[in-house]
Image (spheres, rainbow, N blue to C red):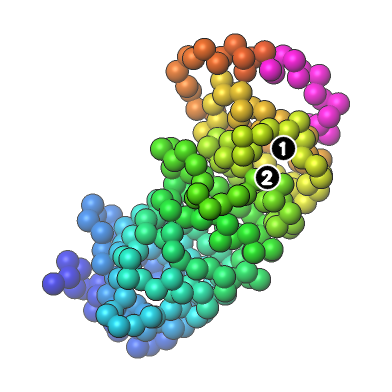
Amino acid sequence: MTQYPNIDRWILYLSRNGLRKLRIDNSRVSLYALPSYIFLCQQLTHLVLSKSIFKPPSGTTGSFHSLKLLSLSKVAFKPEVSASIFTASKLEYLKLTKCTGIHHLNFEGCSQSLFYLELNMNHGVKLGCFMHCKNITIAYLGLPIEVESLHCNERINFTSLFEHWTQISKLTLDGNHLKLLAAGSVMSALPVKVNSVRELIFFRINFTDLEQISCILCLLRSSPGVHSPQIWAKIPAVTAWDDLALQYLQEHSGMSEDINSL
């Protein structure tokens, strides 16, 4: 029996009356198991959920055809959820935060429509699934703190990222993503200037991490349109790498000639 019968009844009623926008903010500790008739809401254009479980009815492959905005926080997808649940959607805005069970989901249907992408602290998400989304203009990428590598089949670095996302104007990256996209080889600058970028924001940055600092300088040199970058630092424990990072910054203290207008 459901723990939230009143909410279930409301969703059932609304599913029969052309529901277009649905927001469920679950403030309880336990997750809310979405009723099967959520898949009857074929006219949904906006779906915002927190602390919920997606589990489709047995024997069905329900999907959302009209979604334009999808925002999920701490949402779990059961293994039996169809990979094509969002394939037919014409998503313009996608935000996934601390979600699980999403490694097999297919977002190919939104390749022409998606312009905002936020992936933060999720488990199993594949960044490569979004490389075909050529119209992304705003992206926010943050990895779980314990994640040390991208999916084993992914071969994405900064060069390939900007080759695919040619319209990107605002990019937000955490320290982990900086290092992973550098793919173990940090250049002084990218092979080609990224002229579309206007805003660069870096968060959870360790100023004693030489690789993170090198990546930031590389991106700044490669983005002539960025005038006011933001760097949000975390306070690390003192390590033996402190002197190396400081030395690197001192050696590049004359970099103002390489970074325009900052």
Q: Are marks 1 and 2 in contact (CB under 8 Å)?
A: yes
Q: Residue at x 77, y 35 (%)?
A: 189
Quarter of the rendering containing residue 177: top right
Of residues 7 and 123, the one drawn nearer to the viewer in this rendering: 123
> Does the magenta run of residues contain 250?
yes
Q: Residue at x 50, y 49 (%)?
A: 152
Q: Residue furthest front?
A: 153
Q: What's the amino acid at mark 1?
A: Leu
Quadrant where the image shows the C terminus: top right
Of residues 54 and 92, the one drawn nearer to the viewer in this rendering: 54
Quadrant where the image shows the N terminus: bottom left
Residue 179 appearing in the image:
yes
> Please, what secondary structure does the residue beneath circle 2 have?
helix
Identify the mark at residue 219; answer none if there is no mark: 1
Q: Residue at x 73, y 58 (%)?
A: 167
Residue 225 appearing in the image:
no
Tag nearer the camera, 1 or 2: 2
Q: CA distance from mark 1 to mark 2?
A: 9 Å
Image position, residue 214 (x, y; %): 67, 28
> Does the magenta run of residues contain 239?
no
- The earlier-in-sequence mark between 1 and 2 is 2
Q: Residue at x 45, y 18 (%)?
A: 237
The magenta segment is 248-262
Image position, residue 17 (x, y; %): 38, 87
Of residues 152 and 14, the one drawn nearer to the viewer in this rendering: 152
Identify the mark at residue 158; answer none if there is no mark: 2
Q: Residues within 10 Å of mark 1 (few under 14, many from 20)?
A: many
Of residues 183 and 31, the one drawn nearer to the viewer in this rendering: 183
Location of residue 167 with respect to 234 vertically, above or below = below
